[in-house]
């Protein structure tokens, strides 16, 4: 059972420390101290953690706890944690229990904001487990948007099958990416572009969403699903595949997708993102690398590190290629709608 408590009257840009006390007929159970910070005003720095694909491995060392402990001990003063889907292997109690135990110390550091992966299966337990920013779709949590100081993060659901849900999420993305925030991020599960040997890029999100991201000047899109790391740049948008949260690593294809800057496999990792006026800094931190079927710690190893300057307004205007993509997206969705109506 999930119990919720609403806290009101919080001051902006303030760090709070809390403790949960459960009282029943057997006495009191007291949690360790947790902490969170409220949203800053524009012009202040914002930092957050990103990870994805934290499905349990049933044999050997608990990779999830390795990643969770590393994030909990990271020196970055992060505001929240974003997860790009596949939180658990299956959305049933034993997997949720294992997941919470593995990430307990991490969850005490900051609020946790996931999007749906295919392993959650749009299950009731996902909606019962997490409180999310204002959203829409099922339970008004299926897709969401966080406006936090100079940062906006739009979370989408790429597991939907109804054409109407794609249209709704396109409109949602356009609306929330059109604000005044300097730094724009999007997170969803299936990769727009990927060199993964199994999944690749075959989901049509390059047609459905990429033109919107180009038009509205998105800085970085975070995806999972492929259990490896890849840094891709297309039309001024950075795509990071960050499926290294503890699930079994997967191989990359020999041939890289267009725009691939860096790709590596075999690591369990997370990304830390720091924004300030005029800059975004990203470090991708390796926690361990798989060697002969076992995770070997990789202290102080960065898989990737880069900074982004703000993109000038004129360069954020849609290119001819982006406009053509937008037209193709409309044709694709109209075709899908016609096919569904004929069934």
Image: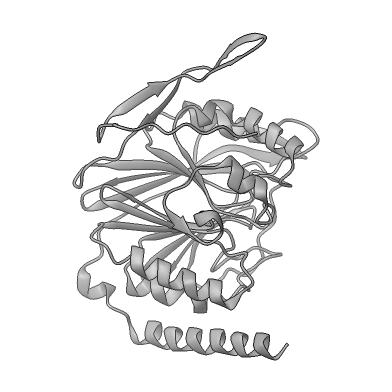
> Looking at the picture, how far across and down is residue 272, in whole percent?
43, 42
Farthest residue, direction left: 43
Residue 249 pos. (x, y %): 69, 49
151 sits to left or right of 314: right
Residue at point 64% right, 53% down?
227
Residue at the image point whose x is 35% and y is 63% from the top: 176
Left or right, 254 with respect to 277, comes to right
Asked if 343 appears above or below 204 in the picture, the reply is below
Q: Quadrant of residue 99?
A: top right
The quadrant of the image that shows the C terminus is: bottom right
Outermost residue, front direction?
A: 25
User: Residue at 21% across / 43% down in the picture?
Assistant: 41
Horizontal side of residue 140 vs 225, given as left or right: left
Which residue is nearer to you in this view: 294 or 16? 16
Q: Residue at x 68, y 44 (%)?
A: 88
Q: Quadrant of the N terminus?
A: top right
* Depth check, front residue: 140 or 156: 140
Taking the image as drawn, is residue 332 in sight? yes
Q: Is residue 171 left or right of residue 331?
A: left
């Amino acid at each position: 059972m999930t119990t919720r408590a609403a806290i009101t009257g919080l001051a902006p840009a303030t760090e709070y420390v809390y403790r949960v006390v459960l009282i029943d007929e057997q006495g009191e159970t007291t949690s360790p101290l947790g902490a969170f910070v409220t949203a800053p005003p524009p012009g202040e720095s914002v930092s957050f953690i990103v990870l994805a694909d934290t499905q349990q491995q049933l044999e050997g060392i608990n990779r999830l706890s390795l990643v969770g402990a590393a994030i909990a001990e990271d020196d970055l003063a992060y505001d929240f944690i974003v997860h790009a889907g596949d939180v658990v292997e299956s959305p049933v109690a034993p997997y949720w229990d294992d997941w919470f135990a593995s990430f307990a110390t991490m969850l005490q550091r900051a609020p946790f904001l996931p999007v749906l992966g295919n392993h959650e299966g749009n299950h009731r337990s996902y909606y019962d487990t997490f409180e999310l920013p204002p959203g829409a779709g099922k339970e008004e949590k299926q897709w969401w948007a966080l406006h936090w100081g100079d940062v906006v993060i739009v979370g989408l659901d790429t597991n939907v099958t109804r054409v109407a849900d794609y249209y709704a999420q396109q409109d949602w993305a356009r609306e929330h990416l059109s604000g005044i925030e300097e730094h724009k991020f999007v997170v969803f599960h299936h990769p727009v572009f990927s060199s993964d040997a199994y999944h690749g890029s075959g989901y049509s999100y390059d047609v459905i969403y990429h033109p919107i991201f180009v038009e509205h000047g998105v800085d970085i899109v975070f995806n999972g699903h492929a259990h490896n790391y890849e840094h891709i740049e297309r039309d001024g948008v950075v795509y990071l595949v960050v499926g290294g949260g503890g699930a079994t690593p997967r191989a990359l294809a020999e041939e890289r997708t267009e725009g691939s800057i860096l790709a590596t496999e075999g690591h369990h990792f997370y990304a830390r993102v720091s924004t300030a006026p005029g800059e975004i800094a990203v470090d991708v931190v390796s926690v361990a690398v798989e060697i002969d079927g076992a995770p070997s710690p990789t202290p102080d190893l960065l898989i990737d590190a880069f900074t982004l300057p703000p993109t000038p307004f004129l360069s954020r205007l849609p290119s001819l290629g982006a406009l053509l993509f937008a037209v193709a997206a409309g044709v694709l969705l109209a075709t899908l709608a016609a096919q569904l109506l004929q069934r």
